[in-house]
Amino acid sequence: MGLSAPTDHRTVSYAPESQEGWVTTRMDFLVNWARANSLWPMPFGTACCAIEFMATAASDFDLARFGMERMSFSPRQADVLICAGRVPFKLAPIIRRIWQQMPQPKWCISMGACASTGGMFDNYAVVQGIDTIIPVDVYVPGCPPRPEGLIYGIRMLQEKVKNERSSDAGTRDEMEPDPASQLYIPPSVIDELGEPFGNSVNQTRSGL
Amino acid sequence: MSKRTVEVELSTSGLDAQGRPQRVPLVTNDGGTAVALQPPPGLEPDLEGEHMLINIGPQHPATHGVLRLVLELDGETVVRCIPHIGYLHCGFEKIGEYRQYNQIICWTDREDYLNSIGNNVAFALGAERLFGIEITERCKVLRVIASELSRIMSHLVWLGTFCIDIGAFTPFLWAFQRREEIYRLIEKWVGARLTTTATRVGGMAADIPSGWMDGLRQFIRTFPHTLDEIDRVLTRNAIWVGRTVGLGVMTPEEATNWGLSGPMLRASGVDYDVRKDFPYLDYETYDFEVPVGTNGDVYDRYLVRFEELRQSLRILQQAADRLPDGPVNIDDPRVILPPKSKATSEMESMIHHFKVVMEGPRPPIGESYVAVESPKGEKGYYMVSDGTAKPVRWRIRPPSFVNLAAIPKMVEGHLLSDVIAINASIDIVMGEIDR
Amino acid sequence: MTRFDVVRTGASASGDQPATQRNVSHRNGAANPSAKALQDKFGSGVKRVDVIWGETIVYVAPSAVHEVIRWLHDDPSQQYDFLSDVTAVEYRDADVPIEVVWQLRSLPYRRFIRIKAQIPKGSPLEIDSVWDIYKSADWLERECYDMFGIRFNGHPDLRRILMWESYKEGFPLRKDFPLRGRFSRSEQLRQALAQNPEARYSMEELTIADAFAELPTDMRERLSKGERTGE
């Protein structure tokens, strides 16, 4: 075991039998280039991160140069769900429904600490990370992330989009939540993700 | 009481004889002559149809956050409006019972996130009342500067988003560009743009760096140009006036009874401003005026907030001129951290540092309610202490929560697009409403 | 034509110039004159008066609260026309009763007073609503009910406001409610996702008779039996 060398993301290894033809690769390149450079965001802005998102979209940091100036508030016309801000449990079915209303291909950026992990709100009211509700592609840390940070996250998403292949079977599959519980990952995983760690363990003493 | 009246002359008031928004008659060119279309004769007046139930939100571009409005519409007229909130409830008050007073200051940023520093100041004032601490003069002036910058930031967001809701996009970009300048100033001071955590119990997190005042003066010098530009574009614009005059009227008695505060209350004609009536941070020594409206409609709220921006600049100028030298933090080792140079070299300071960080400063048993004038209204922090480092109860009196409760009253009888305008004029922040 | 006035300072019936309070003492401050007036008028209804950090707190018997607040609102020498806040405080000591707190302001006289009523924890948590005096109490009392479980008698529509209406974990701000809630994270998420956002129309919203016929059959059946939907 031990440490292995970091994988070089520019090298793609594939089995010869699944080798794609020249036309397919060119089509993939074209389609991915078009998708990556015209991602229409659906800003699911709840709290402070939404203000930084607005600042990123405004003149000084300008999202328009990345093709994202057309904010789509209707999920039916959006590509990227940018969850900017904390998501309490009351809002959980809403974000689930919005995600389900978005047509494929769709991606999700979880902006900020609260959307990624629940942030500083480790209490009864806040979902400990929206990845327990919907699948997330890029996490942008920060509280709130600087506009440059959000732009870095968007660029990462664009890289991810450009590396997609039409031959990858499962990429564009819709998530299938369990009909009884509406969870799409096992409950044990959710509990593990939501557990406090580090100093957070000591933060539930009241008084003293 | 001296009054200065600002008269704005408009070519149209946008209202008809009954005070309702004026309807534009339809005109068609029928055989060369313009003919106003009349509804066809014989149309039964009671052919009304059913009422529609429309749901706006919680995810919606114009609700300013996760607010859900359920409207019962008769055609396009609102018969009833029922707001649903709680979609951003994050348990602030519960968490406050598990955090030391200095730790809670981080939380006050996130609650009304447009007025972060203002909230930090408000909480620190409340905590200092609870501890019985008098802060230094320099700290008071710095806090006034912080509060007014915060007021400008909040009103600029309100202005930008209000314009977008009515349909004007460009002032949003102008407003956010000015906000970036303030962000840069605040970042030089405390290190963060939005979530500042700038105060501590007994002082501030940091003193202003050298050269900061020049940046502030530069801002004070250049900001009026943007204000004048936006003023030129909006205030006497017939579309703007037609869309905002006469909407959402609250009489002064209603406004007081419904608990409205801040520009909402002042636009209705009640001159209650916490800075004037229950002053803090020596606001009575600053020379500024409080705009008070007459009609209590959306246009008056716009005018009041706009004038508040100008008055905030006045206060900033005075504060910048009078900033005294001296220490920013009080000299009490039980409450304030010692300077890092001492904490790393002297044993006593290191122990003080340890105790303040690990255990937290402890106030005597008691309670305090301190209210400040936030851009949204009367913002109060009520804290109850039982002598331990963590409060027994931390209550946030949210101005937007109480202001929003009046929306069913304001919106009845108006059209659907007016609902958006009225909602925008309340200047709500869901973080503060739901906490 | 429309105009607005820019005034120099607020008008006040007392005519004095308010100033920032300095060096406020912990317990020896002067009480608000309304406290004495309340004691004179209500006698045994007023339990005690405290002045902590310059703020006057009047402890009132729970049964007399509505009367006291009504008098403070209506009497021309008091004129507490602005209700700042209604909230509750539960102390960490289990024997200390829960206090319901009203923070009132008199805008004409520039006064501030805090009224408190203590409700022992063993008895059902109930108190009179002041909605008929101040309309701002509507949502403030609903929030108090949502967070503490205190019922306000006379409130027109007392239901949860911040948590969803079928929230099963309890009343969050009570001291016996743990910070992270009573259920596990996956259970909380399961209950949250089981909410039907569309079912959360209040009874008021669903009394639109014309749309009643278009509601789904099961909802119509539940409504005609008098049940509240979505809860």
Image (cartoon, coloured by chain):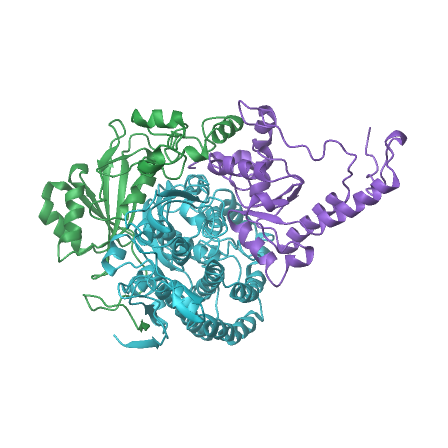
Chain colours: A purple, B cyan, C green
Extreme residue in the front direction: B31
In the image, is residue B250 above or below residue B71? Answer: below
Spot occupied by residue C1 in the image (x, y as percentages of width and height): 32, 73
Spot occupied by residue B256 in the image (x, y as percentages of width and height): 26, 56
In the displayed structure, does residue B335 sit left or right of residue A59? left
Name the quadrant of the N terminus of chain A: top right
Q: Is residue B202 visible to us here? A: no
In the image, is residue C62 above or below residue B19? Answer: above
Q: What is the number of callouts on the image?
A: 0
Out of B232 and C142, give the one closest to the viewer.
B232
Q: Is residue B158 visible to us here? A: yes
| Quarter residue B240 falls in | bottom left
Spot occupied by residue C81 in the image (x, y as percentages of width and height): 21, 55
In the image, is residue B193 above or below residue A183? Answer: below
Residue drawn at (35%, 28%) of the image? C220
Residue drawn at (69%, 55%) of the image? A66
In the displayed structure, does residue B54 sit left or right of residue C141? right
Extreme residue in the right direction: A16
Name the quadrant of the C terminus of chain A: top left
Spot occupied by residue C128 in the image (x, y as percentages of width and height): 21, 38
